[in-house]
Amino acid sequence: MSAGSDSAVGEQPAANLKKATKESESANRAASAPAPSPGASATPGTPKKAVKKTVAKKAAAKKAVPAKAAKETAAKKAPAKQAPAKPAKTAQSAKVAKAAKTIPARPTKPAKPESHLSMVRRARRINRELADVYPYAHPELDFRNPFELLVATVLSAQTTDLRVNQTTPALFAAYPTPEDLAAADPEAVEQLIRPTGFFRAKTKSIMGLAAALRDDFGGNVPGRLEDLVKLPGVGRKTANVVLGNAFGVPGITVDTHFGRLVRRWKWTDEEDPVKVEAVVAEIFPKSEWTMLSHRVVFHGRRICHARKPACGACPIAPLCPAYGEGETDPDKAKKLLKYEKGGFPGQRLSPPPDYPGLPAPPLAAG
Ligand code: SF4
């Protein structure tokens, strides 16, 4: 056997070998060339069969890749599109939030006692807030002069300003000056002021102070605290009301509302009105004393009541250490509001022009 019989190539003549090499090169070129479009003709010199095979393979490859990629993309996109999985997320968040709500609050550390400076700052802020809430705060007794204010204030003990306001028009119509009242028939005065309660004792007081004004002050009301407190039935509170509202002398009026509120606000623990007045006088400048008194009393009468404070409707709740002592539900608290805050008439029959509420009805209509 010849050496050329081991390989078919080796056994081919040189011309055949050349032809085969050319064919092989053409096939390779066709394989590496871009795939022809379906209508394109085969590369000249390339065997049709080989071209068809190559084209078919490439087309299949091309088709296969986008299909796979499309599948993958679709798979990737699908969860994104189906991001309406959001509701599921929201539901989960809601669950988490609900769970968080039900987690019992950590025991809070006992609050640090408030420093005096912080209390003073808080107290002044309360005053500013109240000034916004009650820009029309005023004394709630009707009066036209210092004498009427003095008598009305004495009559207001143990009763409401409303009842006094409903009573005094007839009294002042009958006895417009201290001289008139000092010379009146006590029984007639008693009948006139009967609606205010304690009418016998009050008759003695107002007739006594009218006589003192006539005899000691020329029929005028004095404008000094030390003179006022010497008049029958006139204490420090009454004197401060008269000084602050008839004479423009700054004064702090500590009545039942004022005392209750400043203790709730922890301005002081004192029960004695004179001591309360002294503490509050240290917190505020004199220029604020009179209006502060009106604002605090207004708040006590309208929102921060003795038995059921309307905490849920209270504009100074964030500043109040006693928040929660009363009704905290906003709707229920709203129903507890009084006078103009609750849409009702006020206490004065003749309120100042800037009062936003309704005037009180006269006695006969009440
Ligand atoms: S929060 Fe309540 S207790 Fe405090 S001032 Fe307001 S109504 Fe009064």
Image: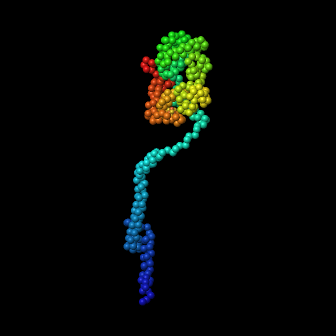
Q: Residue at x 52, y 15 (%)?
A: 203
Quadrant (top left/top right/bottom left/bottom right) for the N terminus: bottom left
Q: Quadrant of the C terminus?
A: top left
On screen, 329 above or below 38?
Answer: above
Classify residue 219 as left or right of residue 17.
Answer: right
Closer-to-camera residue (295/155): 155
Seen in the picture, residue 105 relative to 164 is either above or below; the reply is below
Residue 70 quadrant: bottom left
Q: Quadrant of residue 118?
A: top right
Residue at (49% x, 35% y) in the render: 324
In the image, residue 144 above or below residue 305: above
Q: Is residue 15 visible?
A: no
The front one of 166 and 199 is 199
What kind of colouring is applied to the model shown?
Answer: rainbow
Q: Observer-nearest residue: 18 or 205?
A: 205
Q: Position of residue 182 (x, y in %)?
A: 54, 11
Q: In the displayed image of the protein, which residue is found farthest to the bottom?
A: 1
In this picture, is 138 found above or below 170? below
Query: What residue lies at 56% left-to-right and 23% top-to-bottom?
Result: 237
Image x and y of residue 23, in percent: 42, 76
Which one is nearer the viewer's eye here, 129 or 208?
Answer: 208
